[in-house]
Image: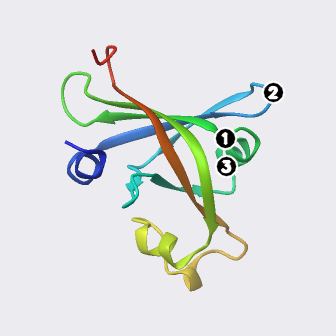
Amino acid sequence: MNLKEYFANTNGYGIMSTSDSKGGVNAAVYSRPHVMEDGSLAVIMNNRLSHENVKDNPNAHYLFIEDGPGYKGKRLTLSFLREEQDSDLLFELCRRCHPSDLEPEGKTRFLVYFKVEKELPLVGSGS
């Protein structure tokens, strides 16, 4: 199953790990990423620490834990490609966003695109 099918059909939750240029790490809960036609992953990020870290250090890691018994999921090593700020596509993709005119004053969101460098199962080496 490719990543687009996987994330469209699998429920669970994700954790994005990032670090700044000095190695200060951060982890935050994220929903399922959007898999774009070119194979990149798009993640909606608020203007917080994870987003600041990605601007500082283009490497990130996304860990997805499937709902249900056992330890199933994926570990994805990512590298930053580009971003869009408060774009129409961001609001189209956002599962929990309000229309842009209903968003709180001054709230900024980014649609951040990543290249998947490596894919591993949640547990084990994948070999």
- The earlier-in-sequence mark between 1 and 3 is 3
Q: In which quadrant is the N terminus drawn?
A: top left
Instruction: Please tell me how many numbered marks the rendered image carries.
Output: 3
Label 1, label 3: how many angstroms apart (C-alpha)? 10 Å
Q: Position of residue 28 (x, y in %)?
A: 55, 39
Front label number (2 vs 1): 1
Element under disc 1: loop
Label 2, label 3: how many angstroms apart (C-alpha)? 15 Å
Please state which amino acid type lies under the numbered disc 1: Pro
Element under disc 2: loop
Quarter of the image for residue 93 reads: bottom left
Q: Which residue is tagged 3?
A: 51
Q: Are marks 2 and 1 in contact (CB under 8 Å)?
A: no
Q: Residues within 10 Å of mark 2 (few under 14, many from 20)?
A: few
Q: Position of residue 92 (x, y in %)?
A: 43, 75
Please state which amino acid type lies under the numbered disc 2: Lys
Q: Which residue is tagged 1?
A: 58
Please state which amino acid type lies under the numbered disc 3: His
What residue is shown at x 21% (from left), y 22% (from top)? 70
What residue is shown at x 39% (from left), y 52% (from top)? 39
Q: Which residue is tagged 2?
A: 22
On screen, 56 above or below 123? below
Label 2, label 1: how many angstroms apart (C-alpha)? 13 Å
Q: Residues within 10 Å of mark 1 (few under 14, many from 20)?
A: some
Q: Residues within 10 Å of mark 3 (few under 14, many from 20)?
A: some
